[in-house]
Image: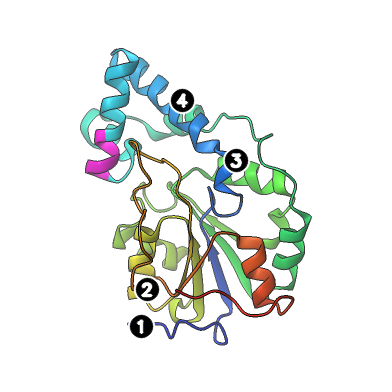
């Protein structure tokens, strides 16, 4: 598969991660999800919260997601986990009418590709009033519970979204999720944050790597630049 040029002139499909991408990481929804994961693991494995958190983080590192570890090692039925951990308060996410406007002006298809659940994605999109912009949500169930950044997840995504990766741009807050996107020919955009997603640090902290074509700390501003409202966009 051809590498992307890093530009946007050829792009007619826009692929967005959900959490900490379509809303600012400062909303810290993951803090709620993180707590609920620990609670679920504690109850499911009958351990205290301290041990549950250790297991949760170990499975994240070993299997890509805590859910994958629970499924592989303990035969967990995923729906009960996903329903529990995503039952959160969305009020920290502020309205963003400008994002709605920028998405409206962005030409082409728009798709959500998330390691979370479809229900969670639908709730967040509805809260932001941007559901109507997206013609597909490819969630962890749709990718057979194989998480990004695994190549198999991307192949399942492409099959279901029915798009040409060489004509697509992908936005994600984890630059590790953009490695395979770049390999497939997508233009890659990293939503730079420095939040703690796993165990004391952002797993993707540090300098912008070579597989990232563009980096920004504000999706709405970046899309506005693409739509011609602001001068230029910041590349790596």
Q: Nearer the viewer, residue 15 or 216?
A: 216
Label located before the other in sequence (1 or 3): 1
Q: CA distance from mark 4 to mark 3?
A: 16 Å
Queried whether the magenta region covers residue 59, the answer comes back as yes
Label located before the other in sequence (4 or 3): 3
| Circle 2 residue | 182
Locate the N terminus by quadrant.
Answer: bottom left
Residue 57 against residue 146 in the figure, above or below:
above
Q: CA distance from mark 1 to mark 3?
A: 34 Å
| Circle 3 residue | 27
Q: Position of residue 100 (x, y in %)?
A: 74, 60
Residue 120 against residue 193 in the figure, above or below:
above
Locate the C terminus by quadrant.
Answer: bottom left
Q: Are marks 2 and 1 in contact (CB under 8 Å)?
A: yes
Please give the range of residues in magenta. 58-63
Q: Are marks 1 and 3 in contact (CB under 8 Å)?
A: no
Label located before the other in sequence (3 or 2): 3
Q: Which label is found at residue 3?
A: 1
Q: Which numbered disc, 3 or 2, marks the residue closer to the eye?
A: 3
Q: Are marks 4 and 3 in contact (CB under 8 Å)?
A: no
Q: Position of residue 202 (x, y in %)?
A: 38, 46
């Amino acid at each position: 598969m051809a590498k992307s040029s890093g530009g946007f002139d050829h792009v007619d499909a826009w692929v967005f991660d959900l959490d900490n991408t379509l809303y600012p990481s400062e909303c810290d929804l993951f803090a709620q999800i993180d707590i609920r994961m620990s609670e679920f693991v504690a109850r499911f494995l009958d351990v205290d919260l301290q041990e549950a958190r250790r297991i949760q983080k170990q499975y994240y590192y070993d299997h890509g997601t805590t859910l994958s570890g629970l499924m592989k090692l303990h035969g967990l039925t995923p729906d009960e986990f996903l329903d529990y951990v995503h039952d959160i308060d969305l009020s920290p996410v502020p309205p963003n009418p400008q994002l709605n406007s920028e998405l409206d002006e962005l030409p082409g298809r728009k798709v959500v590709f998330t390691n979370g659940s479809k229900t969670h994605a639908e709730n967040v999109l509805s809260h932001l009033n941007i559901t109507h912009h997206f013609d597909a949500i490819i969630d962890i169930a749709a990718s057979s519970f194989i998480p990004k950044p695994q190549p198999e997840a991307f192949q399942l995504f492409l099959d279901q979204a029915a798009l040409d990766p060489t004509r697509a741009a992908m936005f994600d807050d984890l630059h590790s999720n953009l490695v395979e996107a770049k390999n497939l020919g997508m233009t890659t955009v990293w939503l730079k944050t420095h939040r703690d997603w796993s165990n004391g640090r952002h797993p993707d902290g540090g300098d912008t790597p070579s597989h990232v074509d563009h980096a920004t700390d504000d999706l709405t501003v970046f899309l506005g630049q693409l739509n011609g409202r602001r001068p230029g966009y910041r590349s790596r």
